[in-house]
Amino acid sequence: MSSCRHLLLLAGFALACAPATPSNGLEPVITERLYFGRNTADSLTVTDSAWAGFLRDVVSPRLPSGFTVWEAQGQWRDSKGRVRHEPSFVLDIVHSPPSPKADSAIVGIIAEYKRRFRQESVLRVVTEGRASF
């Protein structure tokens, strides 16, 4: 095979393996969705005012670029197989691809919620995507 053809094949292979360039102004992002249950021992412990304080004092300082939050109703099975229903808050965060700063902020938010409201867990779902602002 001639060296010219060989170079063309290599160039074609390199282009095929290159990451796709975002189109239509879309850039790579990470979406993180956190689910915060409001109950402890079958009673509502995270009131609307306690949540508002948590957003103001804990979430906003750690996520100065912004976030979205809404109320939700969750359903899950406990360790005995019983269906449980729980009011929840969902926090949606969109940021540039992974960074230690973003991860640290989110881990800190989760840890403080668990500590402050005596929660066993906070569900964290991470999704890669593209967005434009």
Image (cartoon, rainbow, N blue to C red):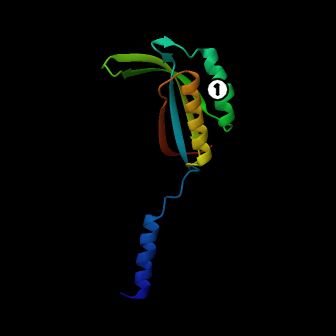
Tag 1 secondary structure: helix
**Vertical arrangement, residue 8 with respect to residue 105, above or below:** below
Write down the quadrant of residue 2 in the picture.
bottom left
User: At which x and y percent is residue 51?
Assistant: 61, 20
Which residue sits at x=53%, y=58%? 21
**Vertical arrangement, residue 44 with respect to residue 74, above or below:** above
> What residue would you read off at disc 1?
55
Which residue occupies the extreme left position in the image?
Answer: 81
Q: How many marks?
A: 1
Q: Quadrant of the C terminus?
A: top right
Q: Residues within 10 Å of mark 1 (few under 14, many from 20)?
A: some
Which residue sits at x=59%, y=48%? 100
Which residue sits at x=65%, y=29%? 58
Which residue occupies the extreme top position in the image?
Answer: 43
Which residue occupies the extreme bottom position in the image?
Answer: 2
**Vertical arrangement, residue 34 with respect to residue 7, above or below:** above
Specify the amino acid type for callout 1: Leu
Q: Quadrant of the N terminus?
A: bottom left
User: At which x and y percent is residue 18?
Assistant: 48, 64
Write down the quadrant of residue 60 in the picture.
top right
**Vertical arrangement, residue 96 with respect to residue 71, above or below:** below
> Looking at this view, is 69 or 38 the one in front?
38
Write down the quadrant of residue 63 in the picture.
top right
